[in-house]
């Protein structure tokens, strides 16, 4: 491994300049205007997989964006890794808040700033370079590897479940490896053993055929903005509990062991509030901040739109109001069941004065794994060697819908090892990745393949 680590150290600058090319492609899956960019990004990734020595590289079409596939299966008898990552990114608005253009990666104070730097292009590139280092130095990998890179993760992985279902045999593996999560904190590398799931809905209300003069009609005609605000207010009680009937029925309670383990993590609530400019924390009573974000379900308003929002004042009774609402789910909540209960509740609390439309958007199942499996332990050793520190075990509040599919459809355990930081601004302006962690991540990934090669199948 020395030779490989030396090679990675010598190539440090080249990795950054290559990563910049990947970050320059605006592969925003949510915006139809960027469809070609997403396709171009898939091609870039496929070319890169060929360059680093993978075989059978292909863009696999789906009804949406293609899945990039590549493999190297020359390690007879050794375990097979299924590496998953995503090459699509989130939209960049509000653009005005970026300190450098989102698709012109810029290094400042040891961080590389660009949309996708942390989520997830920087982290997939880390593995590409780890594979390349093995191939360049040894002409082979110590393990078999199948790489799949998705172009629709940020829009709910709509076509990936079908793709996996249709390619079960081709995707057979011993372990799934994913780097699309964060370390617990700066200097605290971690392995993630749980993710929340998601249900995402849009609510539209209409109170009249067109906007109306609020003087002539106000008081007699329902204001959908007001009605929507009242409906949203009725979704939680004062203690932060979600009032959708049956919402908590399947929630697996936190174990005492988890609560105790999390209490020992180096989490400083004061610093957290300071880092993110939060005046005072909130949430369900009787739970800590980590418990609230990792192990409890939520209901959030992601966006609201109604009426006049420009400069000045306009006396208008808006005809329509819209809210985007999502719920993060924990084991064993099922997205379909929760979506149904939510919709029933919304219909019940909507007054007859408005026309209601509820549209279900994407979603995903929660995921959790026991972390005593040999692959997770192997990852622990690799991170320890790469970062010089023993990793901690964490759950995350975010979602990667495909992880539960891998577990359920392929029956394969997953190792989630991320090098982004919680304040890397994923999904926000000024997304970044620590250049040092990116580099250590390449070394740790190279070591991970080595460690996994020694796990008895
Ligand atoms: N990389 C994130 C998931 C993540 C976030 C893991 C934070 C760990 C910590 C991923 O790209 C993401 O943002 N997923 C979406 C999924 C959704 C669109 C179905 C999410 O969590 O909002
Ligand atoms: Zn991601």
Image: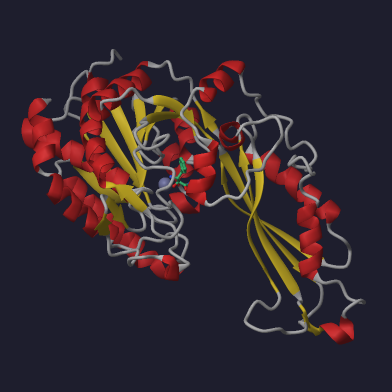
Residue for point 35% across, 18% down: 377
The x, y position of residue 32, in whole percent, is: 45, 67
**In the image shown, does 422 or 143 lie closer to the viewer?**
422
Q: Is residue 142 visible?
A: yes
In the depicted structure, whether residue 187 falls above or below residue 275:
above
The x, y position of residue 190, in whole percent, is: 39, 29
In this rendering, position of residue 42 left or right of residue 299: left
Q: Is residue 158 visible?
A: no
Q: In the picture, which quadrant includes the C terminus?
A: top left
In the depicted structure, whether residue 282 falls above or below residue 105:
above
In this rendering, position of residue 219 left or right of residue 427: right
Res 146 → quadrant: top left
Res 103 → quadrant: bottom left
Res 130 → quadrant: top left
The x, y position of residue 368, in whole percent, is: 52, 27
In this rendering, position of residue 336 left or right of residue 397: right
The x, y position of residue 311, in whole percent, is: 62, 82
Residue closest to the far top? 456
**In the image shown, does 291 or 380 lie closer to the viewer?**
291
Residue for point 80% across, 84% down: 212
In this rendering, position of residue 198 left or right of residue 11: right
**In the image shown, does 92 or 388 lie closer to the viewer?**
388
Report how many numbered discs are placed on residues in the image.
0
Q: In the picture, which quadrant includes the N terminus?
A: top left
Residue for point 23% across, 53% down: 19
In the depicted structure, whether residue 437 falls above or below residue 172:
below
Residue closest to the far right? 220
């Amino acid at each position: 491994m020395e030779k490989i680590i030396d090679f990675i150290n010598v190539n440090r600058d080249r990795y950054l300049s290559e990563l910049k090319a990947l970050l320059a492609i605006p592969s925003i899956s949510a915006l139809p205007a960027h469809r070609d960019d997403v396709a171009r990004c898939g091609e870039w990734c496929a070319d890169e997989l060929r360059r680093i020595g993978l075989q059978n590289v292909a863009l696999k079409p789906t009804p949406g964006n293609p899945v990039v596939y590549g493999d190297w299966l020359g390690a007879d008898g050794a375990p097979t890794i299924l590496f998953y990552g995503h090459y699509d990114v989130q939209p960049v608005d509000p653009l005005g808040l970026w300190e450098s253009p989102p698709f012109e990666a810029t290094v400042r104070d040891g961080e590389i700033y660009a949309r996708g730097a942390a989520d997830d292009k920087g982290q997939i590139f880390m593995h590409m370079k780890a594979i390349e280092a093995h191939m360049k130095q040894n002409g082979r990998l110590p393990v078999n590897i199948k790489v799949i890179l998705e172009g629709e993760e940020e829009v709910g992985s709509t076509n990936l479940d079908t793709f996996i279902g249709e390619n079960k045999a081709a995707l057979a593996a011993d372990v799934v490896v994913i780097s699309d999560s964060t370390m617990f904190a700066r200097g605290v590398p971690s392995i993630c053993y749980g993710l929340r799931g998601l249900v995402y809905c849009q609510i539209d209300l209409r109170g009249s055929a067109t906007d109306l003069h609020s003087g002539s009609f106000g008081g007699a005609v329902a204001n959908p903005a007001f009605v929507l605000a009242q409906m949203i207010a009725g979704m939680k009680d004062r203690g932060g509990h979600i009032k959708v009937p049956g919402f908590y029925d399947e929630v697996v309670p936190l174990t005492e062991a988890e609560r105790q383990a999390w209490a020992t993590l180096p989490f400083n609530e004061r610093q957290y509030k300071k880092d993110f400019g939060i005046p005072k924390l909130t949430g369900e009573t009787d739970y800590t901040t980590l418990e609230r974000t990792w192990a409890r379900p939520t209901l959030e308003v992601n966006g609201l739109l109604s009426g006049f929002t420009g400069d000045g004042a306009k006396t208008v009774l808006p005809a329509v109001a819209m809210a985007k609402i999502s719920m993060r789910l924990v084991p064993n909540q099922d997205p379909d069941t929760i979506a149904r209960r939510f919709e029933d509740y919304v219909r019940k609390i909507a007054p007859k004065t408005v026309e209601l439309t509820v549209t279900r958007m994407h979603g995903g199942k929660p995921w959790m794994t026991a972390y005593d499996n040999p692959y997770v332990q192997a990852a622990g050793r690799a991170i320890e060697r790469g970062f010089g520190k023993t990793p901690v075990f964490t759950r995350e509040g975010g979602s990667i819908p495909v992880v539960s599919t891998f577990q359920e459809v392929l029956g394969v355990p997953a190792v989630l090892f991320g090098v982004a930081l919680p304040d890397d601004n994923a999904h926000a302006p000024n997304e970044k990745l620590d250049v040092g962690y990116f580099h250590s991540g390449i070394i740790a990934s190279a070591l991970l393949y080595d460690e996994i090669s020694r796990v008895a199948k």
